[in-house]
Image (spheres, rainbow, N blue to C red):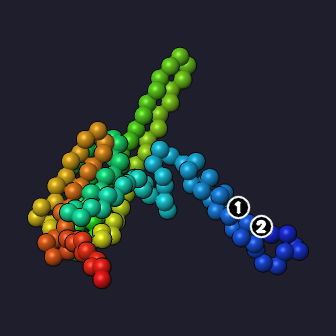
Amino acid sequence: MLSLSHRTRRPTPVHYLDEIGRMLDRFWEGEQWPLLEGRYCPPLDVVDSDESIIVAVELPGLKPDDIELSVEGSVLTISGEKKESSEEKGDGYYHSERHYGRFQRVVKLSSEVDTDKVTTEFDQGVLTVTLPRAEGSKRKRIEVAAN
């Protein structure tokens, strides 16, 4: 919550920057995967080239059967369920943790894609989805003519 002294009537930009900093600190103090509204939110990268759009998502501990993909128009949806547990035993102690939760990432693509040519690769916990652009939506470089 934004706190202001009784003399300050309107927050200054510095107050907002401080509050944003505190919010980000609280956000990154969480689990191995960031939590948004009680859901896991796996990190992803999007590379947008002339021929295709490549989306890489970190999904450690998951198997391909745990992941669902769909493309509708220019929207890619990646969802699934994370089931993670760890157990540690030692002299006089036992520690067990379990993390469960559904996740969903929705990526607005910059153009329509050819859904018949989409390919996926799942290697060492990273899902890579290659989405070739539809023929009519490929980028073309246009030269600017000089007079």
Viewer-proximal residue, 125 or 132? 132
Element type at marker 2? loop
Q: Residue furthest bottom?
A: 147
- The amino acid type, in three-letter code, at marker 1 is Asp
Q: Nearer the viewer, residue 138 or 85?
A: 138
Q: Quadrant of residue 79?
A: bottom left
Q: Earlier in the sequence, mark 1 or mark 2?
A: 2
Relative image position of residue 14 (x, y in whole percent) = 73, 66
The residue carrying mark 1 is 18
Cα gap from disc 1 to disc 2, whole angstroms: 10 Å
Instruction: Locate residue 52: give its quadrant.
Output: bottom left
Residue 89: x, y in percent? 47, 23
Q: Is residue 112 left or right of residue 83?
A: left
Which quadrant of the figure contains the C terminus? bottom left
Select label 1 or label 2 by which is in front.
1
Above or below 111: residue 65: above
Q: Residue at x 33, y 70 (%)?
A: 108
Which residue ends up furthest to the top in the rendered image? 91
Asked whether residue 20 is in view, the answer is yes
Sort mark 2 into few (<14), some (14-19) or many (20+) by Cα contacts within 10 Å: few
Q: Residue 43: which numbered mark, if any?
A: none
Numbered label attached to residue 3: 2
Q: Quadrant of the N terminus?
A: bottom right
Which residue is pictured at 30% across the width and 62% down the height? 48
**Whole-percent x, y for residue 50 in the image:** 24, 64
